[in-house]
Each structure stands twice: as structure tokens, then as C-alpha cells.
Image: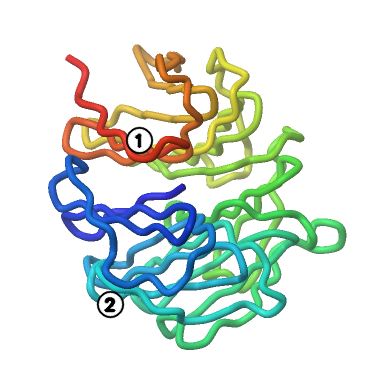
Amino acid sequence: MSVAAAGDAYVAVGDYGTIVRSRDGGKTWQQAAAVPVSGLLTAVSFADPKNGWAVGHGGIILVTRDGGETWAIQHTADGKPVLLGVHFTDADHGYVVGAYGTAMLTADGGKTWEPMPVGEGRDADLHLNHVFSGPDGLLVAVGESGSAFRSKDGGQHWTRLATGVSGSLWSGLQRKSGQLLLLGMSGKVLESTDQGEHWTVLETGTTQALTGGVEKADGHLVLVGTGGATVTDQDGRLVTAVRDDRQNLSAVAASGSGLILLGQNGLIQDPPTH
């Protein structure tokens, strides 16, 4: 479901409490020695090579202090909601989002978690699918019904952004040049060059839901989604291809000049294309 870099290693999480780790760029993977849950893990984030967190169903927040080899339950959210996103900006400051507006923050590495109200009124119950960093300490959370929220003060206060779309947004990222990208239903890719004040819909040529993306070291963008859809930027435009296996893809990581793809059939190392 999700993958994160832990220094030179990669750690991926998935169903049945699966957590696996690769030290060779995704060629081989080893299962974590100790994982105390057996449910679906939906997201993982590392603050540095040693300190990482994973979240999932049942309100579970797991922590590792050894780069993903062993894990422990750090916290269980009240009501045991489905948690869908986790993001740590350093070893102390982290953010978790999930179903029905669930959102929490920590300033002590997860020892304590506090509620983090993101939406107001009807927006307070929206599913929040992903949270990530933007430029200048910005935080962005995305969710259902085209919702996106921005915080400029470390999650203390949030403002809804006018995305102009109504379908669910599943993920997002900041490009090295500072632009924000949001990914969602029906092949939607939204771009903002002004920290979310205005958004432009980029044409992708696909109606598949886009669920994850990465900008490679060379500046090229790779997005993935359902039905084996992969979107890359070529000559200033986005081009969609469909993998032969057509499996649903949930996330992607850059490994050297190649890629690590995550999907319904597990982990795929995608070699560089020349």
C-alpha cells in the first residue's frame, strides 16, 4: 500500500500486517522481524534512517526505532478509526489522517497524540486520504469530494483550498521546483505554483484513479494508478501508458534510475527505460 525511504533502505507496508524492507534498491525484500498487528497497514513514513511510523485499520500507529526491522504499537486512536495517511517532518513532529475527518498530531515523536481539527462544519467528517509537506513548512491534506486543506503553522490551523474538482483526491507531492501536485479520481492531476491558492488541471489522457507519485532525481515525474496506469512527463506534457499486467498500483518510489511499484500483486522492481 505504501513505501518510504529509510536512509538507503526502503520500507513497504500492506495487508495482514505485512512490513518488508529492502537494502538493495528493491531487488530483494525481507519481512520485518516483529510486527504486532495482522490488519491492513495503509501508510508509512520515516523521519530519518532509524525512526519510522506506520498506520492502518483499527486506529493503529506503529513505531520503529531501528530502521524498520522491528515494530511496536505506539498508539491506538480513540474509536479505532481507519487511518490512511502518516507524515513526519522530523523525529518529533508527525501528522496522521484518516476516515471521517480523523486527524492527529504529535510534537514528541508519537509519545502523545492530540486531535488536529482539519475541516469545519460538513468538512469535518470528510475522509482524509493523505498528508504531505509543501514549500516553506506548508502542510497539505487531501480527501474525498475534491477536498484539500492547507496549514501554515504546523497543523494548528487549516484552510480549505478551492481545487475546482469534486472527485476524491488520493495523494499529492511537492516537486523539487516547489509546485504542488494533487492526484485523484478519473485521472485528475492538479497543479499549483502558489502554495495552493490556485489550481490548474493537467491533462493525463486517462480516466483511471491516480493514487501515488514520485519525482525522480533527474526531475522526471512518475504517477501510478488503477488498471496499471502509469503517467510520466515527456516534453512538457503528461503521457499515460498501461502496464501489460493491468494490476492496480497504489504507490511508487524512485530507486536510482529505476522504480519500485506497489500494487495488488505485491512489489515490482521496474528497471530504467533507455
Q: In this view, does 145 lie to the left or right of 243?
A: right
Per the image, label 2 sits on a secondary structure element best described as loop
User: In which quarter of the view is residue 90 placed?
Assistant: bottom left
Q: Is residue 24 in view?
A: yes
Instruction: List x then y, in percent, for residue 166.
Output: 76, 35
Per the image, label 1 sits on a secondary structure element best described as strand
Which residue carries the number 2 mark? 65
Q: Which colour scheme is used?
A: rainbow
Which residue carries the number 1 mark? 261
Q: Are marks 1 and 2 in contact (CB under 8 Å)?
A: no
Type of the residue with mark 1? Leu
How many badges with numbers are in the image?
2
Instruction: List x then y, in percent, for residue 223.
Output: 43, 30
Instruction: List x then y, in percent, for residue 139.
Output: 52, 59
User: In which quarter of the view is residue 254 placed?
Assistant: top left
User: Which residue is nearer to you in this view: 159 or 233?
Assistant: 233
Residue drawn at point x = 63 percent, y = 37 percent: 198
- Above or below residue 5? Residue 94 is below
User: In which quarter of the view is residue 184 placed?
Assistant: top right
User: Which residue is nearer to you in this view: 98 or 14?
Assistant: 14
- Above or below residue 243? Residue 86 is below
Name the residue at the right extreme: 121
User: Which residue is nearer to you in this view: 120 or 61?
Assistant: 61
Question: Crowdedness of circle 2 by 10 Å Cα count: few (<14), some, many (20+)?
Answer: some
Residue drawn at point x = 26 percent, y = 69 percent: 33
Instruction: List x then y, in percent, for residue 243.
Output: 41, 17
Residue drawn at point x = 80 percent, y = 63 percent: 120
Q: In this view, does 163 lie to the left or right of 8?
A: right
Q: Earlier in the sequence, mark 1 or mark 2?
A: 2
Type of the residue with mark 2? Arg
**Residue 179, label in figure:** none
Tell me the CA gap for discs 1 and 2.
25 Å
